[in-house]
Amino acid sequence: MSKSYRLAYEETFACVQCGYCLPKCPTYETTGVETQSPRGRINLVKLLAEEKISIDSAASSIELCLGCRACETACPTNVQYGTILQSAKELITKEMPSSKMELLLLEKGLPNKKWQKAAGRGLEIAQKTGMVSLARKAGIMRVFPESIQAMESIAPMIKMPKKKERKYRVLPPIGKKTYTVGFFVGCIMDMMFSKINDDSMKLLQLAGYEVTLIEEQTCCGALLHHSGKKRETIALAKKNIAVFEKYDFDFIINSIGGCGAMLVEYPELFDEHSEWHSRAEKFALRCKDISVLLAESSLPFTKEIRKVVAYQPSCHLRHVQKVIDEPHQLIKKIPGIDYRTFEKQDMCCGSAGIYNVVHYNEAMEVLDQKMTHIEKVEPDIIVTSNPGCHLQMKLGVEREGKTEKIKVVHIVELLAEACEIY
């Protein structure tokens, strides 16, 4: 099989090399190098498909792409950059196998609920007993790479929901029922930020939605997909589609920008004329970010929050799900909020799944530029809409030495506080 067959070769011809994408690309912004831009990467994929360059020649540029897809939003000719990038990642993954550790974490760890719970409980116990703090003081953390040390320093206090607290059940609406929704909890989100998931469901109830939490759901597959592992992603997608099909939900709601983008793109995993493509389309049409439903509702805000707020949008919420206005609208509705926009607000923060761990230095360059723009509006609170962005912004605040001045929260946390949900 030729590389042109396996790569999205035909799609590369839609790029007219106009350069509109360049100012929107984080890696072009930090490097100024053509091969680190969407336009440059599209050219590399085209040359790779024509077998004019080797996979090794293109791999580093492809791997350093954050996959934020801001270039798609900026593109005047509707180039399907995500499809082109994904085809290159799948080829590179096939020709250049991942490390055993990466395979263990992505293929065995994330889709496994028992592993997630065990990891979450282990970290929760280590934090509560002071083992993490002791390891830090004893210098044990220094044996880990700088990226792991950085992530550990901003990790939230883990509080895994107990079985009696997290019953998989139907949560009735408060007041008149509007719609029935199934709630998607995610993996990392539910392990590190389970309270945000719980608060999300309470907000939906408060807005008049009947919320159902089903145990059979699994990982969305986003991190596997971004690593070029299509077969494994399809297996997870089929499982999620099948379990949610058992229920007659009006919507399937999540509070995770990255996972939500994967869910709405499930149809792209399957052959267009297959039964699974049709089932994936029906599933994807029902998937919405929580901000979409809450923006249409009348949340009863009972508390003023007199703070300066800046919002860092999730790239996959904005550029893939096309959810742009709703988070702004919700933040502005909160009594007392002084909402301020900042330069290059729509540019990636450098999180991008596990990019900030795998490509730490490059991610920090992107993050530092982001913080330069944010700090100009002097926020008290930075609002995010994705767990990866949440951790990355916390790291940015810490790198600037402003942890006492600037708080980082998920938009659900801000709304829950304004509605006095605790």
Image (tube, helix red, strand yellow):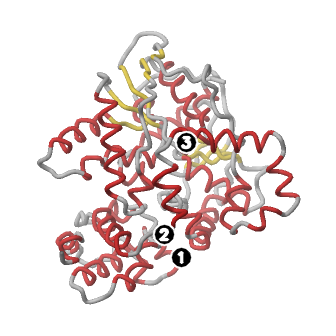
Mark 3 neighbour density, 10 Å: few (under 14) some (14–19) many (20 or more): some
Disc 2 element: helix
For the N terminus, the image quarter is bottom left
Q: Which residue is mark 2?
A: 26
Q: CA distance from mark 2 to mark 1?
A: 6 Å
Disc 3 element: helix
- Image position of 296 (left or right of 137): left
Q: Is residue 7 above or below residue 107?
A: below
Front residue (pair 175, 379): 175
Q: Earlier in the sequence, mark 3 or mark 2?
A: 2
Q: Position of residue 168 (x, y in %)?
A: 49, 22
Disc 1 element: helix
Q: Is there CB contact under 8 Å for labels 2 and 1?
A: yes
Q: Is residue 400 above or below residue 181?
A: below
**Amino acid bearing label 3:** Met
**Amino acid bearing label 1:** Thr
Q: Which residue is mark 3?
A: 189
Q: Which residue is mark 1?
A: 30
Which residue does the image show at 71% across and 53% down from the upper left? 154
Q: Position of residue 143 (x, y in %)?
A: 76, 68
Q: Quadrant of residue 241?
A: top left
